[in-house]
Amino acid sequence: MQSWYEKTPDKFKFSVKAPKTITHIKRLEDCKEEIERFYSVIREGLKEKLASVLFQLPPSFSYSLERLEAIITAVNRDFNNVIEFRHESWWKQEVLEILSDNKIVFCNVNYPNLPTSVIKTTQIGYVRIHGNPKLFYSEYTHEDIEALYKNVKSQNFETAYIYFNNTASTAGITNALQAKKMNQEL
């Protein structure tokens, strides 16, 4: 991480994804030490270039108040924490309000069978485009990317990040370049 820090421009920002051990294997349970170590490493290595910390939870991680409380307890509020849910049960007002109250970013996704509206819980917007309908492969149309871009912009985030994870083909590169061009034009 120190090498990445040194090789990137001064204004470059990184978003780092929490290890699967934390999110998928331990599912945020009994991993306080791993989480603290993870935060320490990324803080030390990336310093002020660290923008966000993503906790992507598995599709089998459905909503419960206990799980929501575990998320709130697990994250270090000194960081811009982003939570990516992959189970539709999390799309509820109560969850969004609690995330907002705790300054946790809701990760907006374009993922098969999940809602695609852009939701704002903090001043940071965070979007992950995964490929839809074919996960990791589907390329979005120019109109899809323009609609997404305008939707994100309409939320008036102070800062917004859009990540393309439809990279099993060249779709992610094509779509990222389209979004970059829109950012320069609109």
Image (spheres, rainbow, N blue to C red):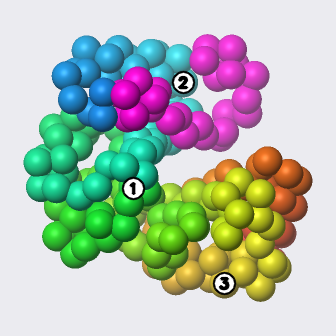
At label 2, counting other C-alpha atoms closer than 10 Å, the crowd grade (few under 14, some 14-19, many 20 or more) is many
Residue bearing the label numbered 3? 147
Depth-wise, is mark 3 or mark 1 nearer the camera?
1
Residue drawn at (32%, 17%) of the image: 34
At label 3, counting other C-alpha atoms closer than 10 Å, the crowd grade (few under 14, some 14-19, many 20 or more) is few
Query: Which of disc 3 and disc 2 is earlier in sequence?
Result: 2
* Amino acid under disc 1: Phe
Q: Is residue 122 magenta?
A: no
Against 185, is 108 above or below?
above
User: Is 77 left or right of 149, judged from the image as shown?
Assistant: left
State the separation of the CA atoms marked 1 and 2.
25 Å
Against 180, is 19 above or below?
above
User: Is 140 left or right of 52, judged from the image as shown?
Assistant: right
Choose top left, top right, bottom left or bottom right for residue 53.
top left
The stretch in magenta equals: 1-25
SS class, disc 1: loop
Query: Which of disc 2 and disc 1 is earlier in sequence?
Result: 2
State the separation of the CA atoms marked 3 and 1.
22 Å
Residue drawn at (59%, 37%) of the image: 14
Residue bearing the label numbered 1? 85
Against 43, is 79 above or below?
below
Asked if the residue under mark 3 is in contact with the one under mark 2, i.e. CB atoms within 8 Å, the reply is no
Residue drawn at (19%, 22%) of the image: 30
Residue bearing the label numbered 2? 46
Can you give x and y, in whole percent of width and height, for residue 32 in the image? 22, 21
User: Is 59 left or right of 3, judged from the image as shown?
Assistant: left
Q: Which mark is residue 3?
A: none
Can you give x and y, in whole percent of width and height, for residue 1 in the image? 60, 18
State the separation of the CA atoms marked 2 and 3.
33 Å
* Amino acid under disc 3: Ala
Depth-wise, is mark 2 or mark 3 nearer the camera?
3
Q: Is residue 13 magenta?
A: yes
